[in-house]
Image (cartoon, rainbow, N blue to C red):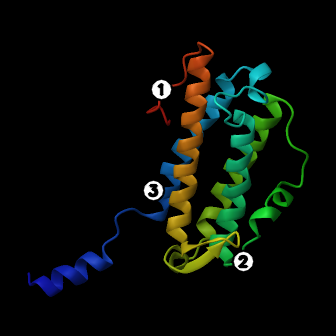
Amino acid sequence: MSNSNQATETKSSIVITPEALLEHWQGHRKLTRKMIAVFPEDKLFSYSVGGMRPFSELVLEMLGMAVPGVKGVITGNWQKLNELPAHLKKAAPTTKTELLDRWDEATEALNVLWPQIPPHRFLETDTAFGQWEGPGYFFIFYWIDNEIHHRGQAYVYLRSLNIEPPAFWDRY
């Protein structure tokens, strides 16, 4: 095969399908849910190490971007960053059960919304939440990376509380 054919073939190759990408993300979400579940309720909304936000606030940040973000990828219409709490249309959870319920609602919403993403939208450039420019896939990777980062903070919290966290690789 000539170099030009290889270049064309490489440009059109799919590394991961949209379905596999959602499965990957949902695997991370399952692990984050396990982290929420193991976190002591009396620490979930208040415990902090080194000035980091409590885990509940980190979870709310993840929730505030996931479903509104996928809606933005679908439609190209994005709320401004400071408008994201309006998407939740509910008061912030005050118990672990409420937070887990909110997590589960978002998980189901992602499963319903995801197939509505037109394939071309993964590659189209947008300005997400009025701030970040990039293609749809870039934002999805950001939300996954952001979740991993905040889950890492929760690992530090749990270890500092002498609680064994779920294994980082247990995403199923």
Instruction: Identify the element where label 2 is drawn.
Output: loop
Look at the numbered discs 2 and 1 and tell me whether their residues touch, using CB distance below 8 Å: no
Q: Could you say which quadrant of the image residue 72 lies in?
A: bottom right
Question: Residue 51's spot in the image, x, y percent?
Answer: 68, 34
**Location of residue 7 (image quadrant):** bottom left
**Can residue 94 be seen at all in this image of the molecule?**
yes
Q: Secondary structure at mark 3?
A: helix
**Mark earlier in primary sequence (1, 3):** 3
The amino acid sitting under disc 2 is Asn
What amino acid is at disc 1?
Ala
Residue at the spot of label 2: 77
Gap between marks 2 and 3, in whole Å? 25 Å
Left or right: 59, with 159 as reference point: right
Q: Earlier in the sequence, mark 2 or mark 1?
A: 2
Q: Circle 2: is it few (<14), some (14-19), or many (20+) Cα within 10 Å?
A: some
Q: Which residue is mark 1?
A: 167
> Does residue 31 appear anywhere in the picture?
no
Q: For the view shown, which residue lies furthest in the front direction?
A: 50
Between the residue at mark 2 and the residue at mark 1, the CA separation in whole angstroms equals 37 Å
**Neighbour class for label 3 at 10 Å: few (<14), some, many (≥20)?**
few
Q: Amino acid at mark 3?
A: Ala
**In which image quadrant can residue 71 be found?**
bottom right
SS label for mark 1: loop
- Residue receiving disc 3: 20
Q: Is residue 96 left or right of residue 140?
A: right
* Circle nearer the viewer, 2 or 3: 2
Q: Please report whichever mark, 2 or 3, sits nearer to the chain's N-terminal start.
A: 3
